[in-house]
Image (tube, helix red, strand yellow):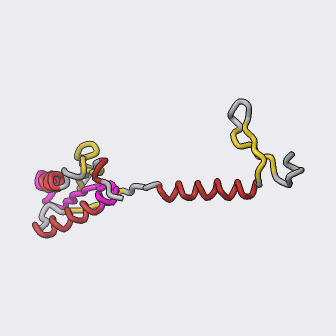
Amino acid sequence: MAQAKDLDLVEISPAAKPPVCKIINFSKFKYETEKKEKEARKKQKTSQLKEVRIRPRIGEHDLEVKIKHARTFIENGDKVQLTAMFSGREMQHKELGLKIIDKIKGALADIAEPEGRTSSMGTRVFLTLTPKKKAVSK
């Protein structure tokens, strides 16, 4: 029947019982499926991990700017890693960095939630914030 109509016999669903076949133009079918897959890939949102670095002796205005940057990252659907960096004698006062991280976490509490706990590695303290479900804007 397919040869008589000058078309192709295409197996649509091989897993079904019995398998589903159609008599169609195969190149047109292949083009349409590729177009659907491309459209589906466009609609997917990949989330990235953005980093906001701070120092324990950061100024008030500089901290506000960092919070504003973190807010835009989270509103775009990205995760934000807060990193407090210490050097020299600042290592003796890690609580200052933890206070600043807690301040940022409190300022972003309306749109972000912490992923895990605050962790420390060497001269740095980390906290990752993820956007809340309703906070992501399209």
Name the spot of residue 45 as percent of width and height, x first: 43, 55
- Which residue is painted at 80% across and 46% down in the image? 9
Q: Quadrant of the N terminus?
A: top right
Q: In the figure, residue 116 lies in which quadrant?
A: top left
122 or 53, nearer to the observer: 53
For the question of whether residue 94 can be seen, the reply is: no
**Left or right of residue 125, residue 8 in this image:** right
46 or 4, nearer to the observer: 4
- Which residue is painted at 24% across and 55% down in the image? 124
* Residue 74 highlighted magenta (yes or no): yes
Q: Quadrant of the C terminus?
A: bottom left
**Left or right of residue 45, residue 82 in this image:** left
26 or 67, nearer to the observer: 26
Report the magenta residues as a range.
73-98
For the question of whether residue 4 can be seen, the reply is: yes
Q: In the figure, residue 78 lies in which quadrant?
A: bottom left
- Which residue is painted at 65% across and 56% down in the image? 32
18 or 45, nearer to the observer: 18
Q: In the figure, residue 25 lies in which quadrant?
A: bottom right
**Left or right of residue 116, residue 10 in this image:** right
Name the spot of residue 26 as percent of width and height, x first: 76, 54
* Residue 39 highlighted magenta (yes or no): no
Name the spot of residue 117 as percent of width and height, x first: 24, 43
Name the spot of residue 122 as percent of width and height, x first: 26, 52
Up the image or down, 136 lies above or below 57; here it is above
